[in-house]
Structure formats: structure tokens, C-alpha cells
Image: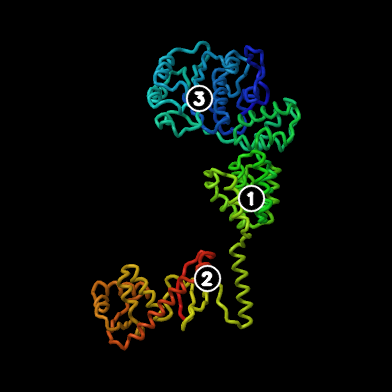
Amino acid sequence: MLLSAPAKFLIRNPFGMSYLVLARKYRPQSFEDVVEQEHVTRTLGNAIAMGRVAHAILFSGPRGTGKTTVARILAKAMNCGKGPAPTPCNQCRSCLEIASGNAVDVFEIDGASNNSVDQIRDLRENVKYMPAHSRYKIYIIDEVHMLSLAAFNALLKTLEEPPAHVMFMFATTEPNKIPVTILSRCQRHEFRRIDLESISRHMGKLCEREGIRIAPESLALISREAGGSMRDALSLLDQVASCCRQDVAYEQVLDVLGVVDRKLIFDTAAALLAGDVPVLLNIIDDVYQRGHDMKRYFADVVEHFRNLAVVRIGQSVQRLVDVPRMEFDALVEQARSFSAASLSQIFELLFRETTAVKLSAQPRLAVEVAFMQISPLRPVLPIDELIEKLDKLQKSISGNQTRFPECPVSGSSHLAESAGGEFKTAVQFDAPAGSEPSNGEKGWERVVEAVSRQSSFLGASLRKGVLKKFEGDRIELEISGNGFTDNTIRREQNRAIILQACREVFGRPIAFELLSVGPELDERVRQKEQENRLRQEALQHPLLTDVKEIFNGNVIEVKLL
């Protein structure tokens, strides 16, 4: 949003000072001078050439990206003595008055301090009068979102149907606060943040004109601190130039701006990836002793790991990482030695700690805790590589004819573990969903689980029984001498639930018969209860819990061997 040539006017104050800050001295005077907003300037230039300029235009976007500047250039283009023309001459009376800020037909209004309905009523009364000597009477209202609701309502009718000699131009950083009734009456243009390379390149040109010798890495540092705002960047450059005279050293820029050296950020990332806690603590102490903001330092580290993870993804990602070219090359070099999974893991863990650091009353301690928790972590292997290694191990053990449980992530895997009793248990993770059970016991377990999802009480009753026979399309279940359990299962509505579950599990109608027997079945019932107890012990085993957490899996079946 800055000029390629200095403006011609200096405003002298009563004390004889004639210095203009760079943001004003090099303010753009034509659309071609505006930096990185071509989508707006090209549209406006074409509209002027075709005679299709709207009577009300809204410029919205981040601070310092050129909204008010473009509004002034558009005002000059519309009132130029040789126009309307896409490129104002900057020599006629109207152009000179607008450039110097004293044009009688161009009114720049601060929306924050002129936000009452009475002031808008005065504006509405004045629009009826013709301009003094220009083609249009133009009102530029900056920060228009600060107007009150009553002021907006007073402006509605005039904004929709203004006199032919009146134009409105609004600028705002918060368009969401403007009523939709106003937005619908304006042609809207969105300004974008300016990337670091464009800011650095433009500041380099201005430094050449001003005779300021400054290294590219210093310009990159200033650009980063500007946050996409050209005005902020030039203000910081003014500050640095005033402190350092003509020769600006990188260390001086760090001291003046009070920011953390990018080398410290790279060193922090290297220490985190290496798990070197002493180095991390020394870096944190160095940052703290220099008086830097620990919260800002932690945010820079989080952003750095985000950039590392993005860079490690693959090619053509430079546009996703808004850093200078020299730093991008360093990011690629640092990310090359680590897998994308490892970088993403650390980035995720750091991001989780952002809130704790931000809200901490002692941010240094919060940063130390976060780093000390993350540094012991070893780089993770990609899941595909891990599966490949486990499969190779399984094949090598199978070749030695040694009994060993299959890998929990392969197609028909089990995890063998002794239950400490008469039975041995194995947990199967991945039985194919929807497939027909291979035996009656397994199929009946699925039926009981399906029934339990609808009625936990009925499912508990079925578990007290023993599967007597399963052949063809018929199931027989034995229940020991307990009249209450027998009556519960024989109820018509409960039998309907059981039959429906059988149909869902086996994919066909199944006949279900309940056999009531005497105390001779008690031993089998006790055996069934012991099996259920062993299944529960297997499900609660710590090793199984760890496997589920590592592979993010679910237990499909517990098999007693």
C-alpha cells in the first residue's frame, strides 16, 4: 500500500519540524503503487474506464493494508481534471488538494468520533448541495462500523438513492458489525493481508531511497512483526532507523523490537526433537533473562512446529508457510530428518498446552513444564511401517514353528494371555462385521449381545443359560431350576426380541426353544459363570488396555481356550 515515489508535500508544524513518517511520505498516489491488492485496484480501474463506478463502496480488511489509501486514489480518479480516469494525473487542482488533505469536495470522516445520529443528519442535509469545483462530492467514512444503529438507519435512504453528484466510500476492519441493510446497498471490496516477501521487498526499495543500509534478514524480522500490515511494517522500520541511524545491524533490530531471535526458535525445536532437556532449560532461561514475553516465545515455537509439519508433507507447500525464502530453506533442512508423524505429534502436544501457558500466572514455569513433558517422547513410527515390521516379526517366528500370538492389527489376530486359572483367554480384535458366526457358541454370544442392547435384564437372564444345541435353523437353551429366569425368557415380548436378534445375527429366521432342567445343570451354570468372570478379567487386563490405546482399537471378541 505504499508509494514508489515520495509524495510532494510536507506539513510543517509550528516547531519547525518537517519530517514525515515513511507511511505518509510514501503513501501511494495511484492504483499501480498499491502493494498486493491487485484484485481491488484492477476492478476499480476497469469500473472507472467503463463508467460503472458504484455510488457507495465499502472497503474492508485488516489494518494497514490500504483501504483509506485506495479510497483517496479513487476520489482523485473520479475528480481528476483529466478524468474520470483509472490513473489520476496528480497535477490538477483536485488531485493536489486531495493529496494534501484539504480538498473542499472530499470529506474524510472518522466514524468513531462522528457516530451520532445528529451528525449523520447534518451529512444528509449537506449532500443536496453541489460540489464547489469538482465533479463529485465524496464522503470517505473511516471505521464506519463505529456508527450507532440510529446513525446507520438515518443514512439508509440517502445511501440507497444519493444525488448524482455524491459518492460514499466506507472503510472498516470489522464488516460483521455493519447492519446488513447497509451492506446490501454497497459494493464491497475485501483487502488481504500482505505476505512477508512483498513487505520485505517494498521496504528494501524504500531503504535504498532513504539511504538506510539494512540486511534482508532484518527486513524479514520487521515484516514478521508487522502481521501482514504495511503501515505497521513502516512504523517499525521508522523506529529501527531512528535508533540505529544509517547502518542497521540484526542484533539492534532484535533489541529495538524486543522479539526472540529466530535462531533460538530453531534451537528450541532441535532440542525438543532430540529430547535434550538441559538445552531447553538454558534456552528458556536465556529468553527470560532478555526480558522477552514467554507467551509470545511459546506461540512462536508452536507456529514453528506447525510450519515444520506442513513442510514435511511434501512439495509445493511454500505458499502455506508465510516465511522468508531463507527461513523456508532452513525449515526444509530441519524437517528432513524427522517423519511427518513425529512432527505432527509434537505440534499437537504443544498446541494442547497453549491455553495453559496463555492463562498461567507464571508463564516461564508453564513453558518449562510443557517442554519437559514433551521432550522424553521418542519419535513415532508411521502406522504402515509399524505394521510392516510386526508382520515381518510374525513371519519369522512362524518360520521357527514357535507358538506366538498374531499381531493385533493383522487380519485374524489374537492376543494371548494367561488368565491364571483353568482357562486361557485370547482377545480377537477384528472379526469381520456382518459375517456369519463360524460356530454355535460364537453365534449365540452375538445374539446375547444384541439382546442386551435392547434389554440388559433379558440379556442377563440369557447368560444364565447354557447352549444345548445349535444345528440348522434351531437353537436349544437350557436353564437351571429357576422359575423367575424361565418365566422372564418365555414372555411373548421377550421371545420376540430374541428371535429378532437371531434373525439379525444369522441373516435368517431361527427357531428358539427353551429347556428347563433341574439342579443337575448347576455345575454347568457355575462353569459358565467362571467363563464370564475370566472374560471380564481379560478385558480389564493392563496389557490389553495398552494395546487398545496404542492402536486405537476395540475388542471384538474374547475367546476362551
* Three-letter code for the amino acid on which mark 1 is drawn: Leu
Q: Which mark is residue 27?
A: none
Image height of 397 relative to 240, above or below: below
- Whole-angstrom CA distance, mark 1 to mark 2, is 34 Å
SS under mark 2: helix
Residue type, numbered disc 2: Leu
Return the residue nearer the eye: 323 or 275. Answer: 275
Q: How many marks?
A: 3
Determine crowd level at label 1: few under 14, some 14-19, many 20+ residues with C-alpha closer than 10 A: many
Q: According to the image, label 1 marks what residue? A: 308
Instruction: For marks 1 and 3, give the one nearer the viewer.
Output: 1
Q: Earlier in the sequence, mark 3 or mark 2?
A: 3
- Residue 447 horizontal/vertical position (percent): 36, 74
Of label 1 and label 2, which has the lower sequence position?
1
Residue sitting at 47 percent across and 29 percent down? 187
- Residue underneath mark 2: 543
Q: Mark 3 belongs to which amino acid?
A: Asp
Q: How far apart in space, not on screen, are marks 3 and 2 (Cα)?
A: 65 Å
Q: Is residue 40 left or right of residue 217?
A: left
Q: Which residue is mark 3?
A: 142
Residue 107 against residue 546 in the figure, above or below: above
Tell me if residue 477 comes above or below residue 458 in the rendering.
below
Q: Residues within 10 Å of mark 3 (few under 14, many from 20)?
A: many
